[in-house]
Amino acid sequence: MPTGQEGPGALPRPQSRGLIRQLRWVHDMLRRDLAAVRELAARVAGGATTAEVRGGLQGLQSRSLLFQLRANCLGYCQIVHAHHGHEDAILFPVVRQAAPHLSRAVDRLEADHRAVSALLDQVEEFAEDLDHQGARAAIVIALTTLSTELLRHLEFEEEALEPVLDSWERWPEPSDRS
């Protein structure tokens, strides 16, 4: 997990103790950037031109840690896919092993990841064609649904995993799953 970035728009570095703080730090970046994407979707819904949308995407790139990796919502989708993929492959198996009583919560989190993945795929599809009004309307709906579901998921994940992550001193490595 990242430990922090420097510069304008950077979030405070998470504390080294209690890994729940680091998870929340990453989630807070996702929340902040999701809010910026939702604002841009509202501008699209309001009739922004393609040039205005592209300018907004460039603005996201210059203000956001995550959007510095990619210049648009397609990059955001890939970041969320990757974050969830790491949790599914590395974090959740170790949580199941360390805290078997959280298995039902992990089942729900994995189901959430699949649902969010489908929503991200919709956003990616609609973002490819912002020149057509149908795609513009569809991306607004897709981003609104994604926002609702992703924010609900992040909150549940933090609450469910807090007892375990707050007691860990380091993130699990792939070898920790054995």
Image (cartoon, rainbow, N blue to C red):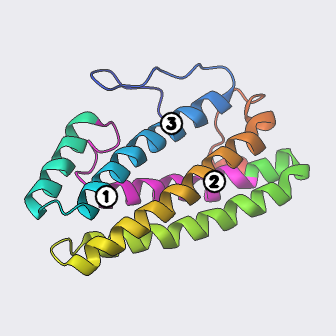
Residue 164's place in the image compared with 40, above or below, is above
Horizontal and vertical percent for residue 80? 46, 55
Residue 116's place in the image compared with 34, above or below, is below
Amino acid at the residue labelled 3: Asp
Horizontal and vertical percent for residue 75? 32, 56
Disc 1 marks which residue? 41
Q: Report how far apart the C-alphas of labels 1 and 3 lie in the structure.
A: 20 Å
Which residue of the protein is positioned furthest toward the left in this rendering?
51
Mark found first going from the N terminus, 2 or 3: 3
Disc 1, disc 3: CB below 8 Å?
A: no
The disc placed on residue 31 is none
Horizontal and vertical percent for residue 160? 77, 45
Disc 3 marks which residue? 28
Q: Nearer the viewer, residue 97 or 38?
A: 38
Q: Report how far apart the C-alphas of labels 1 and 2 lie in the structure.
A: 21 Å
Dot 2 falls on a residue whose secondary structure is: helix
Kindly identify the residue that appears in the image at 37 percent across and 52 percent down. Answer: 38
Whether the magenta-drawn stretch holds residue 105 is answered as no
Disc 2 marks which residue? 153
Disc 1, disc 2: CB below 8 Å?
A: no
Is residue 47 in view? yes
Kindly identify the residue that appears in the image at 68 percent across and 41 percent down. Answer: 158
Q: Report how far apart the C-alphas of labels 2 and 3 lie in the structure.
A: 13 Å
What crowding class fits label 1: few (fewer than 14 Cα within 10 Å), some (14-19), or many (20 or more)?
many
Magenta-highlighted residues: 64-93
Kindly identify the residue that appears in the image at 22 percent across and 51 percent down. Answer: 71
Amino acid at the residue labelled 1: Ala
Dot 3 falls on a residue whose secondary structure is: helix
Disc 2, disc 3: CB below 8 Å?
A: no
